[in-house]
Image (tube, rainbow, N blue to C red):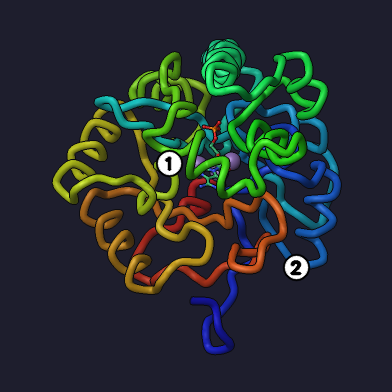
Amino acid sequence: MINKEVKTVFIDLHTHTTASDGVLSPTELLDLARANGTKMLAITDHDTVAGYLSVKSCCSDIRLISGVEISTTWEGTGIHMVGLNFDPEKTAIKQLLSAQATARRQRAEIILQKLQKVGFSITIDELHEYAQTAHIGRPHIARLMVEKGYVNSIDKAFKKYLGTGKMGDVKSGWATLTEATQAIRQSDGIAVIAHPNHYKMTRTKLLKMLDDFIEAGGQGLEVISGKQHPDITTKFAHIANDKGLYASLGSDFHRHFPYAANVGLLPTLPDFVTPVWTTF
Ligand code: AMP
Ligand code: MN
Ligand code: MN
Ligand code: MN
C-alpha cells in the first residue's frame, strides 16, 4: 500500500484517456500527471494510439513514452499486453491495431445483440454517440446501461452482464498473445504483460504463459499495477527476475476513484529488478 514511508517514483507506464475507456481527455490526463509531479508517462489506451498521438509533442517537463494496451488471447484466456516505446508509424503495429479496432466494433455489436435478448435496447449508433470514440469497451456499455436506467451501477452492469463469464464477456476476434508480442517487437517496442495479478490462473499456468510470451519476444512484466499489496509486488518482482523480464509499473488510471491509484503516484519497484525504462 502507498503510505508515508514508501517512496514515490513519479513514473507511470499504464494510463487511459477518452480515446478508449478513460474519462479524462489526453490533455486533462497530462494536466493531472503534471500536477502530481509525474516525470515519465505512457498513455496506454485499449488498442489505440490516437490519444497518445494527439498530445505526442506536448511537453518538455514530462517524458511521454508511446504506449498501447492490447487485448489478446492465450489458450482461451484474455491477457492484456502493454506495448511501450514503439514506433507507432511501423506497419506491424498499424496493422495489428486496425484489426483490433475491427474486432472491437464487431464485439460491441455482438454484446448489444445479447443484451437486446434480455430486454436492454441499445443501438450501435447510440453507443458510438455516447462513447465519443471508435474504440468501444465494456465500460462504455456499462455507463450507458446506468444512464438508461437498466442497472443502478457500473459495478452491477459488470457483475450481472459484462464481467468475466457473463453474457457480455465476448473474447473472440482478438490477436493472439504471440501475434501482439511480435507486432510490438517488429515496431521496435517492448512488450509487457499487464496486471498479472488479475488473471484467474494457477502459478504453473501463469509461468507457462510467460514462457510462451518470452518465446514470442516478450520482455516485460508489470510488477506494480495500481494500488496493490506489497506482497504481490514482491511476488511478481521475483517472477520477473526469474524469467529475465524487465519490470514495469503503472496506475491503470481510468478515472478518479477512492481506492484506485492516482496518475504517477506509485511506489518504487524493489531494488533487485531491472526497470523497463532503463531500455528507453
Ligand atoms: P474491454 O476493453 O471491453 O474488454 O473492457 C475491459 C475494461 O473494463 C477494463 O480495462 C476495465 O477498464 C473495465 N473493467 C473490467 N472489469 C470491471 C469491473 N468489474 N468494473 C468496472 N470496470 C471493469
Ligand atoms: Mn479499461
Ligand atoms: Mn487491462
Ligand atoms: Mn488498462
Q: How many marks?
A: 2
Task: Look at the numbered disc 2 and give the secondary structure of its residue.
Answer: loop
Residue at x-position 55% and y-position 55%: 250
Instruction: Residue 130: name its quadrant.
Output: top right
**Residue reaching furthest to the bottom:** 5
Looking at the image, which is closer to me, 156 or 109? Answer: 156
Instruction: Residue 218: name its quadrant.
Output: top left
| Rendered position, 173 above or below 257 | above
Q: CA distance from mark 2 to mark 1?
A: 24 Å
The numbered disc on residue 37 is 2
> In the visual, does 27 lie left or right of 179?
right
Residue topped by disc 1: 192
| Rendered position, 243 above or below 123 | below
Residue kind at label 2, given as amino acid type: Gly
Residue 101 visible in the displayed image = no
> In the visual, does 26 lie left or right of 175?
right
> What is the x, y in percent for residue 45?
64, 36
* Chain-order first, disc 2 or disc 1: 2
Instruction: Residue 22: name its quadrant.
Output: top right
Residue 272 visible in the displayed image = yes
Residue kind at label 1, given as amino acid type: Val
